[in-house]
Image (cartoon, grey):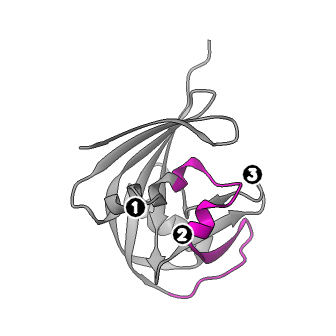
Amino acid sequence: FRMNKRINAVRGVLINDGKILWIKNKQERAGYYDLPGGEIEKNETPLEACVREFKEETNIDVKEAEYKGTLDVITSAEDIISLKIFIVNKFDGNIKYELEENYCYFLDIEELLSKEKVYANTIILDRFFIKLLDQKKEFEIKVNVNEEDKIQSLNFRYI
């Protein structure tokens, strides 16, 4: 009997002129597109993790980010990747397009969603869900995914 893993992580959403800041993995799961973010380290708040991961993956300094809700991705192995979603409202610095572990650039949202290798967390940018980022309420989304990270089922609610 195996205990299911729970990974607590963050993702940051930075939208500028209708384009979204994305990373494309070079190493682990190469070729997959993702929102900037990563695991929350010990003694670190979700906001601190968002700021740190943004700097590591994009070279951007997050000056202000707003917590919007949680997106739980339940994998085919029934592990849970619990993502705290932040919208980045203010930032400083210049994007570094190529870093050690990933590429980083702005893409049109529709173009991004049409990519073959995208993680389930891209659902947050779907026409319905992107409206959640403007709401004053926090959301909770749970998605079940297959091995290719394609969504099999989805539950959504406001908290």
Residue nearest the viewer, comparing 125 with 121: 125
Asked if the residue at tag 3 contacts the one at tag 1, i.e. Cβ–Cβ closer than 8 Å, the answer is no
Q: What residue sits 22% from the left and 55% below the top?
A: 137
Q: Is residue 30 above or below residue 87?
A: above
What is the CA distance from the residue labelled 3 to the residue labelled 2? Answer: 21 Å
Q: Earlier in the sequence, mark 3 or mark 2?
A: 3
**Callout 3: helix, strand or loop?**
loop
What is the CA distance from the residue labelled 2 to the residue labelled 1? Answer: 10 Å
Of labels 1 and 3, the one closer to you: 1
Q: Position of residue 81 (x, y in %)?
A: 52, 41
Q: What residue is shown with label 2?
A: 109
Stretch in magenta: 93-122
Amino acid at pointer 2: Ile
Q: Is residue 105 left or right of residue 138?
A: right
Q: How many marks?
A: 3
Amino acid at pointer 3: Arg
Is residue 39 visible from the viewing direction of this image? no
